Each structure stands twice: as structure tokens, then as C-alpha cells.
Image (cartoon, helix red, strand yellow):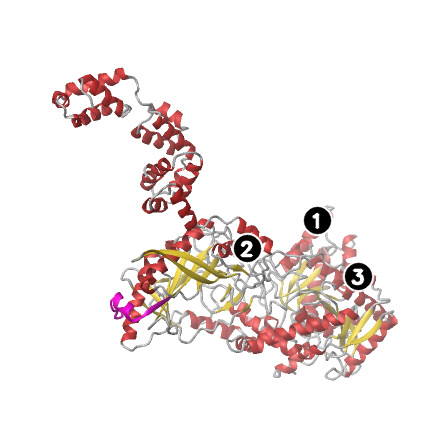
Amino acid sequence: MSELIRKDASELAALLSSSEVSAVEVTQAHLDRISQVDKKVHAFLHVDTAGALATAKDIDTRRAAGEKLGVLAGVPLALKDILATQGLPTTVGSRILEGWIPPYDATVVKKLREAGIVILGKTNMDEFAMGSSTEHSAYGPTHNPWDLERIPGGSGGGSSASLAAFEAPLAIGTDTGGSIRQPAAVTGTVGVKPTYGGVSRYGVVALASSLDQVGPCGRTVLDTALLHSVIAGHDPMDQTSINAPVPSVVQAAQRGDIAGMRIGVVKELGGEGYQAGVQQRFDEAVVVLQSLGAEIVEVSCPSFDYALAAYYLILPSECSSNLAKFDGIRFGMREGDDGTRSVEQVMSQTRAAGFGDEVIRRIILGTYALSAGYYDAYYGQAQKVRALIAQDFAKAFAKVDVLVSPTAPTTAFKIGEKMDDPLAMYLNDIATIPVNLAGLPGMSLPMGLAPEDGLPVGIQIMAPAMADDRLYNVGAALERALVSQWGAPILSSMAGV
Amino acid sequence: MAEPVIAYDEALKNFDPVLGLEVHVELGTRTKMFCGCSTEFGGEPNTHVCPVCLGLPGALPALNRIGVESAIRIGLALNCDIATWCRFARKNYFYPDMPKNFQTSQYDEPICFNGYLDVDIETDEGRKTFRVDIERAHMEEDTGKNTHMGGATGRIHGADYSLVDYNRAGIPLIEIVTKPITGTGKYAPEVAKAYVAALRDILRNLGVSDVKMEQGSLRCDVNLSLRPTPQDELGTRSETKNVNSLRSVERSVRYEVTRQAARLLKGERIVQETRHWHEDTGVTTSGRSKEQAEDYRYFPEPDLIPIAPSREWVEELRATLPENPAFRRARLTESWNLSDLEMQNLINAGVIDLVETAVNAGMSPDAARKWYTGELARVANERSVEVEELGVTHVELARIEELITSGALNDKLARQVLEGVVAREGDVDSIIASRGLAVVSDDGPLLEAIKAALAADPEVAEKIASGKLQAAGAVVGAVMKSTRGQADAARVRELLFAHLGVSE
């Protein structure tokens, strides 16, 4: 039964549906795997053994009673610790929320529960999703299963590592500037950042409200689509949620036909600054796309050069306000309340003790950018850049159906390598940030291993708003061609854990 | 603590006052501005709360459409333009009563702007209308409430600890801000009061708020500055917070004029600051200085989408606006042929709607007015309720009035019938039957009662017979008493004179 952990979610779903295996067996196999490898990987901050087995048992009972269940009922999942879970700790990778048990479920969590998906536990992340390596977690870093000395990407490194380490077949991430896609790229897994508003943000601890989006992660394009269709859809609790039908992502993932499609290669996202092996695998993948019948067009999006700068004004500005509520008054950690200090002193001490350096750095940055006299020069200007980036995308999508680029400029770097150089760290997201700024959907899927270090490389596919299905169509076609070229899925070549 | 002041008239000889009023109105929506929690006043602390209004991690606001509708209706009633597109903004500052440490408000894109309100005041030259220009009316959410425990003053200074109640957090507020009000001269206090009173009337009439100043559902901040002459630039202002009665609005303006004038005449400058009004001593004291303007780091609220009220919706709301209370009062004063004082009595009794309904149903304005400001007001007052809450319908009043006109009831009996109506004993006729309240119209028993009264007091008969007709009152009174009020006093009088052979 240990082979259960090697199976994709769609395979498990079929086995469960035909009652060849029980949800309890599947769940237990993954829990066993977690106890076996997570000491090394540290993908999980909290494993809910009892809760997971109880859900699995309930699914088995209901299936035995003949109840019609969702496609993924009984399939286990790893949940990023940024989504509020009633009765389960939610720390956002921060000391300031240590021990906080939310009294409510995020909308996405509700949907997962309704679909009968088994939540194994909460995964590690950079504190408040600020980072590209999961090294900024207050609870210690997650290790990349491909090489335990290396980072699994971030902020959602716990979710991507859990997939690569076969601790879970499905995971949930959130993506503000690449936190789903970059970890997927450096762990050889698949991750999708849906259209902004495609998935409810209710119950997702906010980093930057206008950029954050919840998304599905898996080891295959189809698995990711199956999870996407469970979590997407309009939610009246989130006013930025789009009231429109969910794109047919599962059908698109099953189709994988790109003959006649026009695919744009973004000139600004590649070349200088990109690792040679990353660029090489990308160029090869483009050739594969062409061989599948797509027309390849080079497009230029000149404003993308300013995306990183705009992003690091908008994000800190919004986060400086979003994180103001963490003051020790109503929930979470409280420091210095010994009867001798004023409320302001207690708030200040709590925040100083509870937030890590990167969080404090961004709060200070954002507070400054929003200050009277600086607002127009920083936040206002960044919003103009944002509009220009959206225009560049609009012009590009007038010519092509999807855009492609490398997901991240490099493969996974060594733990500790960039901790003292925030700017170098920020550059990891250079290719993923533009879609967040424009509210568009993006996917990362494996396109091979870099020749120089044998580590996974991801290709990013970008589509117009609410055309998330195009990502899955193109992704499925490319995945099929590449896996057939390699002879097996990329993770089967992983020595790692 | 109290600062030196000079006489009001003296102050006005030297300075021209400029007013500015900021009024916060709590809307009477059933639920809060951004969540489904109840807005009811007076619940157990922290029982009307949820993840949204507690600002728990991950929670998001969902806009209350009725709140927006109320804002637009208020804007229209105040002759404002309604924005075609506007947004909420975050006002960032740390305070424990504010769950998110930012207030969701509106900044440079208010939903209503550019309006006015005309108010009447009494001047030395008679009644005069002042136009108060309104800068904006915008939507925001209320904060929670801190209670400071253990200190002598109830203020945070000196308290041992503080408690926070978040029931109020997230209740919809509309903030209505005037432009600087100039040209009032010595009438600044009266204009301030008249403006708040007129605004309160309009808001009550719109049904958007219960506008109870004492419960804080209407809160007023009064800005005041002085300048040497109306031609000068505006002076530095003080902002007196939470002036929570009409009388206090007037008094606080008067006080600030005399305080600021005293400072300026001594060559001191006015500090831009928040001041607290003390109802008991009638003075303001310095609060927090605003010299270093607080930086609220406003930016558009990314968790809410822009509001773009369609013109159709705005016109629909405009069409359903009730008549402006001031216009309506003028119209009714004329058509009911009332004096200003009589109208004022109707307003004070809060019965204008009831009287209008009764008159529209056919009752004479005088009769309706007599009932509502007389007996009904008295009973309501006795029970400490509003007249409306007595539940007496104009149909019931019309029937009682009809029976009085026909002589079947006298005033005293009518009052007893009304008592029965208020006690919900049945309809008017069945109350008369069951309580046995009809006027005794048979002369026989009345004559018997007259004879008995005369026999009991023989002197009075002689007085009447000798022409002292005013003595008849005693007999009539005795008869009314012996018939337990069920006699028609006029008929008793007639029978008495006939019996004694005198004529009126």
C-alpha cells in the first residue's frame, strides 16, 4: 500500500470511487509517509492525524452507504498555513499567531471539506507569505526534496515540497507575486495562480489584498485542474470575487490540444539574468510547443521591466495596513502586558517580538510609501505602472492566445545563500509578478532539469483574465509531450528523500 | 483648568466667527456596514460580533447595500451631487477600539458632495434663513467602545485597565461635513444649533437613523475659528468633539467664541487642537493637539470594489424622498391655519404625522390637534412612551369625536373611552357598552338628580332664583358627580333653570 503515495490524485480518485482502496488507507499511507520523511523535509507546521483519519472514515462510510461523492472525495491534501481553519492552528508562519485557533473556516476550506477532501495538515511558508524560499518561516525552513540543502521556493515551499516528497498528492497555495508558481518550478511540480477573483480570498490571511490569490497545486496538470474546479467560484463574502461561471479547466486539462494556437514568448522575461540551463530548457520547451502545432510569436511587454519596482511599493503598502490588526489586543501573541505599560507600548512590543525581519522591513517600506507627501511619488506612481503592465498584456493578448516564459530565473538555491540580500531574493519573482499586477492567471509546470545542476526548471504559461482553461489546455499538451520524451514523470528521476 | 473668557458681545465687537460642523450619524440598518451582525443598541458586550467586525485574520468586508442607499438618500435630501463612481479608503491608525487598526471610510471620493441645507433662525430683524453649504457626506464604519476602569474621571488617564466592546464596531456611519459657515455674525451659536436640529429632522424624516443624540446615534463635532473681520483669512480653528445635545451645540459655540477672543485679545494664538465639551461646567478643555497633523496614510480599500450608483437608481431614490420637513411644516401651518406656536407644539409632541393622517381621513385639523397634543400627549407622557406607541388609530378618534358632536359622549366620558382604547378593551362602541359610559339622555333621572342636589343645598336654589346664575355650577357639578359623569352638563343646566323658572 505504500505505493499509494506515488499515485496521482486522479488515480487515487478512481481507486477510491471503485472502492479498490479506502480513504482511510490512502490517508494513513500519506500520514505514514509524513512521519517518515517530514523530519527531513519540514513541509508541515501541523499534521492533523486525528482530523484527517476522521474525515477519511466519514468518506468511506458515506461511500459505502451509496452516497454520491465529489470526484476528489477521500483524496488527501496539504493546506498552506495561511488559510483559516476552524479548530486547527493557523500561524501564517509567524510567531505572532502562534497558538491561534481560528473560530471559522476560509471559504476555500469549506469547499474542500464539502468535496470530501482530506486535509492532512497545514504547510510551512515564509512568514505572512513574504519570501521566495520559506526560509522566513518563524518555525524553520522547509527543505527541497530534490536536495535537502536547497530551498523549496516560497512563500508556499511547504505545499510544493509536500507534493515533491509524496507526502500529499494535492496542495493549496496562495500566490501574491509567485508564491505558488516559483515553488512549483523549483520542486518539479505544477501550480496555478487563478485569475484574480476566481477563487475566494475569504479566510485567507491577507498579504496584499489586490494581488493575493488562492490556487491549486499538484503533480500533474489534470490533478491541478480537478482541485481548481473544487475551490473556484463566486463568493459573496469576498467582494473582489468574480460572479461568473468557472472556466472549464478539467475539460481543458483532458483535451491538451494546441494545434493552431498562437503562443507568445515574452522578450523581457528571459535572457540576461536567467540561468543558462533554465533558458536552455525553456527554448527547448518552446520548440516542443511549436512541434505540437502552435504558432510561436515573440512579443514585447516593455513595462514588465518596472514590474518588480511597482510590486515592491504596492505590496508593502497594502501589507503595512493589512498587518496592522496584529497588535496583541484580540488574538495571538501579547507581549509586555504586566500592568506597567500603556496599550501603545504593549502593541509595539508585541509587534516587535512577533514579526520577523522581512515582515518588519516591508511594513516600514509600506508605511513610508503611503505617507503624506510620498503617496503620489510611490504608491500612486506604482499604480500607474500597474495600469501600463495591464495594457502590455492586453496588447499581447490581442496577438496571441497565451504567453510563456521561464517561471523563475534560477533553479533552487542553497538555504542561507540569499538571506542577507533581500534584493537578490526579490529577483526570484521577476517573471511571476506581472500576472499578479494585472490580475491574470498563470501556471508553472516542469520543463525538465537544468543540465548544470540537475534541478527542476519550470515553464510559466500566462492567459487573459478568466481564460484559466487555456493554461490547462497548453499545460496538458506540453506535459504529455515532455513526459513521453522523458519516458516518465519528472519526479521519478528525483533521488532526494 | 478653565481658561479666561470675555463677554460674548465684547468678543463679537472684535471678531467674526466662522463655524464648521461635522455630524456623524449612525444608520438604522438592521446589520452592520460590512457584515451580517446586528446593529441593535445595548446588547451584552461583544455579542454582536463576527470574524469580519472583529477584524480576525483572513476576514473580508462585504458592503451593506442598504447602507449605500441610505447614504444616497441623505445626500439627495441635502441637495448633494451623487458620485457616479467612488471608492472606500483605509484610514490607518492604531487604537484598541478599532479592530483592524484602520477604519474603512471614504477619503477623496465621497459618495455625496456639494450640497446645502437652509436653516431658519430668529434674529433681531425677525426670522431669517441661512444657507449652510455642505462639503460632503461620506460612508464609514463606527469603532468599538472603550471603557476605562478604576480611574476617577472615566478617561484613559489614570485608569487601571480598559475594557473594549466591539458591538458598535462596523455600524454604518455617515459623516456630514459642512463648508466653513461664514456670515452668521453674532448668530453663530443659533445657526449651529438650527443646523443640527434641521439635519436631525431631515434624517429622522428619511427614516435612516433614530438620531438619538443621547445614545450617540447622532454625534456632533463643532469647529470654530475667529478672524478680525469677514474680509480676513480664516483663523486657526479648534474642534470640539462629541457635543451631544442641541443645547450643548449652541453653548459650546458661544463658549469657544469667548475663549478664543480672550486669547486673541491678549495677543496669544489659537492652538489647532481637539477640545472636550463639559456639559456640567459649560466649558471646553484641551484634548489632543493637532499641530502635527496625524498621517492616516489613506489609500483605496483593496478589499472592496468601487461603488458606481446608476443614475436610474439615484433617480428612483430621489422619487421616493419624503417632503423636506421644513417645507412640509410651512405647508401644514398654512393649510391648518395654525400659529407658529401651535405648529411648534405639534412638533414638540412629535405628532405631526398622526395629525396629518387623521386630517386626511376627514377629521378637522382643530379636533385632531386637540386630541394629539392634549389627551393623547398627556396619557403618553404619563406612561413615558411616544404618542404613536399608544396605538390609538385615527378611526377610533374619529368615532369618539363623532359621538361627542352628537352628544352621546361628553369630554369626561370620552377620556374614559380613550382609556379603554389604549388598554385595547375593544372598539369604541363596545367599550362604551361594556363600561356603561353613554351620556344619560333621559331627562327623568336627571331631574331627580337635580332635585336631590337642590335639596342637599337649599341656599343655592335661592341664589339662582335671585339671579346669581353662576351658582348653577355647584348644582351641575353635584349632578355630574351623582351620575358618575354620564350626564350632559348643558342639558343639566337647561333642566335646572327650567325647574327653578329662571332664564339665562
Marker disc for residue B64: 2
Q: Which residue in the protein does label 3 denote?
A: A252
Mark 1 lies on a secondary structure that is helix
Name the residue rendered at 83%, 77% in the picture: A284
Q: Position of residue A363 (x, y in %)?
A: 54, 75
Q: Position of residue B126 (x, y in %)?
A: 32, 55
What's the amino acid at mark 2?
Asn
Marker disc for residue B388: none
Name the residue rendered at 23%, 25% in the picture: B481
Q: Residue furthest top?
A: B444
Name the residue rendered at 17%, 25% in the picture: B469
Marker disc for residue A62: 1
- Which chain is mark 1 on? A
Most foreground residue, B449 or A235: B449
Q: Nearer the viewer, mark 3 or mark 1?
A: 3
Q: Is residue A390 left or right of residue B287?
A: right
Q: Is residue A378 left or right of residue A182?
A: left
- Which chain is mark 2 on? B
Name the residue rendered at 44%, 35% in the picture: B361
What's the amino acid at mark 1?
Arg
Q: Position of residue A469 (x, y in %)?
A: 76, 62
Mark 3 lies on a secondary structure that is helix
Q: Which residues are magenta?
A: B2-18
Q: Position of residue B260 (x, y in %)?
A: 31, 71
* Residue A348 inside the magenta-drawn segment: no
Q: Quadrant of residue B124?
A: bottom left
Mark 2 lies on a secondary structure that is loop
